[in-house]
């Protein structure tokens, strides 16, 4: 049996399986989170994010696997273990604010301490402290209904952390807020989680939210994990076409691996409408010589130049160049493929001109289809 001591993980989800009828909503996923870390489950609607979170919270039963936090096993059907949700010591924040409208902010936030029978003077201290942390000191005695959306979400967060739970679970907490507030709250929520040091699992389908907030991201699809890694790793080293496409923008072309050097680099061939390009690039995991692969290049890693200096691979025509201040968003036609290219404004690229596209092998990837 694994314990916290021998894996270093604080939260451990092993081989979690959850069916709804005959559908596997969560299909054998495993992950571990170190104490104090912020992990995000990211993926499109219906991929199993909420189901995974609810499994950790104990808000539904699971069909297989084991969930442990610290030295406490939350759920393990094979061992006949199921800790009821109220004993799991978890703080939760949802999309709907879920605060009690007929109570003041202070009363809403003190509730978790009251049910734990904490004495009144400690309750007052803790509530004041946590309201200061989320920036609601001036709202302490207001009725919860009189708060703005952003303030209500801060109050929910204050209530979730006031009793210093073992775990914080967030399910799309910012998606009811307008864009500007959402962007501000991302940073703030992450700061607060970091300050209180409570291990968090955060669910979102918003990739920029995931990139901004997370220590680690798990990208999910159809109940399975596609990739796990830090934000930079997920963005710059996606392991397959799905992740390349889901996170950020990428030029994706079918490719054949011609050669690999065994230490992560190789050469792929891409054919398009009778033209062929040969590209030195990084090999993603599980890709070898002769394999079908997908060439994945971010627009900022494609360099459009007017003068070929020999190493250029593709010659194309600029079909669109939109000046956006600090960069130019270009499309370059190569056969029937349109490259997305981000160019520096001083290149002054214009629609209709011929350009060469250069690729830096360090930032050009062959990934699994
Ligand atoms: N209570 C339920 N009964 C039946 N099927 C369910 C139930 N809850 C979820 N599902 C199904 O399980 C799958 C995963 O759902 P889940 O709610 O975990 O997705 P999600 O990733 O949170 O999506 P979203 O981004 O839309 O919230 C979906 O196919 C969904 O229809
Ligand atoms: Mg959901």
Image: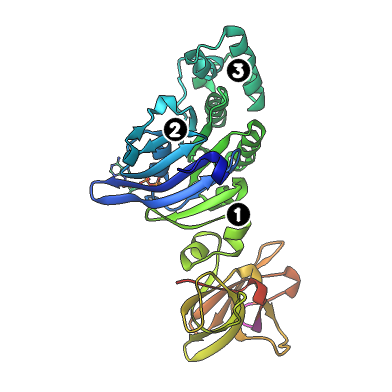
Asked if disc 1 and disc 2 are in contact, CB closer than 8 Å, the reply is: no
**Which residue lies under the disc numbered 1?**
231
Relative to 126, residue 270 above or below: below
**Which residue lies under the disc numbered 3?**
127
Magenta range: 351-357
Describe residue 265's horizontal placement relative to residue 368 as left or right: right
Residue 304 screen position, x and y as percent: 67, 78
Q: Which of 9 and 176 is in front in this view?
A: 9
**Which residue lies under the disc numbered 2?**
96
Label 1 to label 2: alpha-carbon separation: 27 Å
Q: Which is nearer the N-term, disc 1 or disc 2?
A: 2
Q: Which element is circle 2 on?
A: loop
The outermost residue toward the left is: 21
Q: Which element is circle 1 on?
A: helix
Q: Which is nearer the N-term, disc 1 or disc 3?
A: 3
Residue at point 59%, 33% (across, down): 198
Q: Quadrant of the C terminus?
A: bottom left
Q: Can residue 254 be seen in this view?
A: yes
């Amino acid at each position: 049996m694994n314990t916290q001591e021998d894996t270093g993980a604080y939260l451990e989800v092993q081989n979690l399986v959850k069916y709804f009828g005959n559908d596997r909503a969560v299909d054998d996923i495993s992950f571990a989170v170190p104490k104090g870390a912020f992990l995000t489950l990211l993926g499109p609607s219906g991929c199993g994010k909420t189901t995974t979170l609810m499994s950790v919270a104990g808000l539904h039963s699971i069909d297989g696997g084991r969930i442990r936090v610290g030295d406490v096993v939350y759920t393990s059907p094979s061992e006949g273990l199921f800790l009821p949700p109220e004993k799991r010591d978890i703080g939760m924040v949802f999309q709907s604010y879920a605060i009690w409208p007929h109570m003041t902010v202070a009363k809403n936030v003190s509730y978790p301490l009251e049910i734990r029978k904490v004495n009144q003077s400690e309750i007052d201290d803790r509530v004041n402290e946590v309201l200061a942390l989320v920036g609601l000191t001036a709202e302490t005695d207001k009725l919860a209904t009189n708060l703005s959306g952003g303030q209500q979400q801060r109050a929910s967060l204050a209530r979730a952390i006031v009793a210093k739970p073992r775990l914080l679970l967030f399910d799309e907490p910012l998606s009811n807020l307008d864009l500007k507030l959402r962007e501000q709250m991302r940073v703030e929520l992450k700061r607060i989680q970091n300050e209180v040091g409570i291990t968090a699992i955060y669910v979102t389908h918003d990739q920029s939210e995931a990139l901004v907030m997370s220590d680690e991201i798990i990208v999910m699809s159809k109940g399975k994990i596609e990739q796990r890694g830090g934000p930079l790793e997920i963005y710059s080293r996606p392991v397959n076409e799905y992740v390349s496409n889901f996170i950020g923008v990428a030029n994706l072309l079918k490719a054949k691996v011609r050669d690999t050097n065994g230490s992560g680099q190789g050469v792929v061939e891409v054919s398009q409408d009778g033209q062929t390009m040969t590209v030195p690039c990084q090999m993603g995991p599980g890709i070898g010589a002769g394999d079908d692969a997908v060439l994945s290049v971010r627009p900022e890693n494609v360099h459009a130049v007017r003068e070929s200096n020999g190493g250029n691979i593709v010659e194309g025509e600029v079909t669109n160049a939109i000046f956006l201040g600090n960069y130019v968003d270009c499309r370059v036609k190569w056969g029937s493929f349109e490259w997305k290219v981000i160019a520096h404004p001083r290149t002054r690229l214009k629609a209709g001109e011929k350009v060469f596209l250069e690729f830096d092998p360090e930032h050009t990837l062959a990934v699994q289809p």
